[in-house]
Image (cartoon, rainbow, N blue to C red):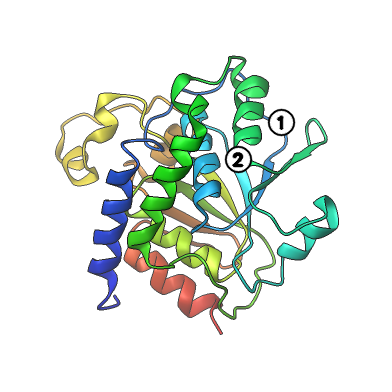
C-alpha cells in the first residue's frame, strides 16, 4: 500500500461530501440497454462526473473508455466521431445516438431508459456543474493525466457507484492507465446497503440484495464489497481498493 493511500481516501471522502449524496443511491431505470452504453470520459472531469452520477442513479452499466489528458488510445476516436476532443461523449449502440454535453446526456438517459422527465435536482445542471468543479479540487488532479501502460486484450470489469470514496481512487488509476472497463453500477437501493461489509458478515442471515448487479456480486462473493474488480485477462478478482490499485499498477503500468 502506498504511503499516500490514506490521503487519497481522505480527499475522496471530501469530494463525496461536497456532492451532497449524489452518485450514491439507485432508483433503477424502467429499461436496461440491450447493448452496453459507451462513455468516453476521464475521471477528473467535473462534467463527466455528472453523467457517472446519473449512471449510478439509474442503475445503468456502461463501457468506460478513459480519455485522460495526453491519452492516445481513445481520445482520437472522439475526434473522429464527433469532430472535437470534448468530454463526456456518449455512444448508444442501441439507438445509434451519439452526443456531447453532460446536460443533454443526462436528459437522454432519463427520457430513454427511465421513461420519465429529468428530476428537479438535475434540471439545475449549472448549479451541479459548479458543485462538481469544487468537488474536483481536493483530488489534486488525480484521474486527469495519462501514465504509460500496456493495453489489456479485454476490458476489465468494475462494480462501483460514483460517490464511493473507495471506488474513486480505483477509477482514477483505470483512467490514468487508459484501461477500458465495464462499469457495473451498484448504487444503494435500501437501508441495509449502508451497512459496512464487515458488519454484514457478522449478521446471522445475509441481507438480500435488491438491484441486479448487487445480486450478481452477492452470488459471486456472498458479501457485497465495493469496489470489486474482475480482470478477465488474468482471471483475477479483488475486493479491496488498495489491493486493486497495487494490482493495476503492477500488471499494466509501464
Tell me the crowding category of disc 1: few under 14, some 14 to 19, or many 20 or more residues within 10 angstroms, Cα based: few
* Up-down relation of residue 125 to residue 65 (above or below): above
241 or 207, which lies in front?
Answer: 241
Which residue occupies 55% across, 22% down?
29
Q: Secondary structure at mark 2?
A: helix
Image coords of residue 166 (percent x, y): 33, 55
Placement of the C terminus among the 4 image quadrants: bottom right
Q: Determine the image quadrant of residue 192.
A: top left
* Up-down relation of residue 130 to residue 243 (above or below): above
Residue 139 horizontal side relative to residue 212, left or right: left
**Dot 1 corresponds to which residue?**
34
* Up-down relation of residue 197 to residue 119 (above or below): below
32 or 221, which lies in front?
Answer: 32
Placement of the N terminus among the 4 image quadrants: bottom left
Question: Is residue 162 visible to us here?
Answer: no
**Residue at mark 2 to residue at mark 1: CA–CA distance:** 22 Å
Tell me the crowding category of disc 2: few under 14, some 14 to 19, or many 20 or more residues within 10 angstroms, Cα based: many
15 or 148, which lies in front?
Answer: 15
Q: Secondary structure at mark 1?
A: loop
Looking at the image, the residue that sits furthest to the top is 116
* Up-down relation of residue 236 to residue 200 (above or below): below
Image coords of residue 89 (percent x, y): 69, 47
- Which badge, 2 or 1, comes first in the chain's sequence? 1
Image coords of residue 249 (percent x, y): 47, 76
**Dot 2 corresponds to which residue?**
102
Which residue occupies 60% across, 69% down?
69
36 or 143, which lies in front?
Answer: 143
Which residue occupies 67% across, 61% down?
154
Which residue occupies 39% across, 61% down?
169
Image coords of residue 86 (percent x, y): 69, 55
Amino acid at each position: 500500500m502506498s504511503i499516500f493511500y490514506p490521503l487519497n481516501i481522505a480527499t475522496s471522502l471530501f469530494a463525496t461530501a461536497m456532492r451532497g449524496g449524489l452518485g450514491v443511491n439507485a432508483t433503477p431505470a424502467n429499461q436496461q440497454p440491450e447493448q452496453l452504453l459507451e462513455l468516453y470520459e476521464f475521471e477528473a472531469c467535473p462534467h463527466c462526473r455528472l453523467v457517472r452520477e446519473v449512471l449510478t442513479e439509474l442503475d445503468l452499466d456502461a463501457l468506460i473508455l478513459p480519455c485522460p489528458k495526453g491519452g492516445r488510445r481513445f481520445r482520437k476516436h472522439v475526434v473522429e466521431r464527433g469532430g472535437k476532443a470534448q468530454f463526456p461523449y456518449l455512444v448508444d449502440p442501441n439507438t445509434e445516438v451519439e452526443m456531447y454535453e453532460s446536460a443533454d446526456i443526462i436528459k437522454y438517459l432519463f427520457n430513454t431508459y427511465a421513461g420519465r422527465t429529468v428530476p428537479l435536482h438535475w434540471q439545475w445542471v449549472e448549479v451541479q456543474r459548479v458543485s462538481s468543479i469544487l468537488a474536483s479540487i481536493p483530488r489534486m488532479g488525480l484521474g486527469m493525466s495519462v501514465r504509460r501502460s500496456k493495453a489489456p486484450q479485454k476490458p476489465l470489469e468494475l462494480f462501483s457507484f460514483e460517490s464511493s470514496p473507495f471506488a474513486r481512487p480505483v477509477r482514477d488509476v483505470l483512467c490514468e492507465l487508459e484501461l477500458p472497463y465495464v462499469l457495473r453500477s451498484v448504487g444503494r437501493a435500501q437501508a441495509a446497503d449502508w451497512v459496512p461489509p464487515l458488519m454484514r458478515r457478522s449478521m446471522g442471515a445475509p441481507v438480500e440484495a435488491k438491484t441486479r448487479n448487487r445480486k450478481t456480486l452477492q452470488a459471486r462473493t456472498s458479501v457485497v464489497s465495493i469496489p470489486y474488480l474482475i480482470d478477465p485477462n488474468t482471471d483475477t478478482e479483488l475486493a479491496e481498493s488498495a489491493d486493486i490499485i497495487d494490482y493495476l499498477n503492477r500488471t499494466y503500468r509501464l
